Image: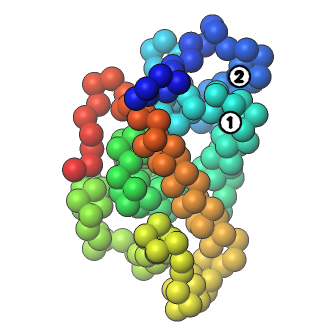
Amino acid sequence: MKHGALYWYEPGDLDDEQRLTYEAIVGGPRATTATAAPVVDDRGRLHGPFNAMLVNPRLGMALQAVGASLRFETSLDDRLRELAVLTVARAQGSQYEWHVHERLGRAAGLTDDELATMAAGGEPVSLSPREQLARALVIELVERHEIDEALLGSALDTFGEVALVELVVLAGYYQLLATGMHVLRTPLPDGASPPLA
């Protein structure tokens, strides 16, 4: 690592373990959303949090697998999932996370007004009660690291145990990514402007 940013791994310079992790990231289920959220730049280098996963490819493999499972193998619908990710990104001030998931959120049905309101720190009035509850849950987790009894009861009644656990793990995973990108000074893709004030 050089001061101020993580070293960029060139695809041709990867060792065998790094190559396996790289292939899992670019060739896995994320490839189906590569148009809305590219994971590589024009030289094939990994974007965002994925580049750091090559530093320790065994840890990186486990992290990318958790992320893929949260995005593609949960009971959460796409709109609710992206709403939760964007809530974490806004609370953490994660420019990269917001940049990528704003596109995915739009593809999942979030409107420009909803996205702009959340980016500004507001609560969109158009959200369903279920979506409002998911946002309240994620905000409590990110800001207080706790869920009070009333909110927990409402969440269990509304989502059930499985989806509640998925939301909690999703919030934690995207907090972890946001923290890593802050510390490692992960840049936005070339030409992108910071989406959050």
Which one is earlier in the sequence, the residue at label 2 or at label 1? 2
| SS at badge 1 | helix
Number of marks in the rendered image = 2
Q: Residue at x 69, y 77 (%)?
A: 161
- Residue 181 is labelled as none
Q: Position of residue 82 (x, y in %)?
A: 47, 55
> Is residue 39 placed above or below 137 in the rendered structure?
above
Q: Nearer the viewer, residue 29 or 142?
A: 142
Which of the 4 image quadrants contains residue 31?
Answer: top right
In-image side of 136 versus 191 (left or right): right
Q: How is the image coloured?
A: rainbow
| SS at badge 2 | helix
> What type is the residue that disc 1 sits on?
Gly
Which of the 4 image quadrants contains residue 17?
Answer: top right
Q: Nearer the viewer, residue 92 or 23?
A: 92
Task: Say whether residue 152 is visible.
Answer: yes
- Categorize mark 2 by other alpha carbons within 10 Å: few (<14), some (14-19), many (20+): many
Q: Residue at x 53, y 16 (%)?
A: 44
Q: Nearer the viewer, residue 177 or 71?
A: 177
Q: Residue at x 56, y 13 (%)?
A: 10
Per the image, the residue denoted by label 2 is: 18
- Categorize mark 1 by other alpha carbons within 10 Å: few (<14), some (14-19), many (20+): many
Q: Residue at x 33, y 23 (%)?
A: 190
Per the image, the residue denoted by label 1 is: 60
Q: Position of residue 159 (x, y in %)?
A: 60, 77
In-image side of 59 versus 121 (left or right): right
Q: Position of residue 150 (x, y in %)?
A: 52, 92
Query: Farthest residue in the top direction?
Result: 12
Q: Position of residue 138 (x, y in %)?
A: 48, 69
> What type is the residue that disc 2 sits on?
Gln
In-image side of 194 versus 9 (left or right): left
> Is residue 4 placed above or below 10 in the rendered structure?
below
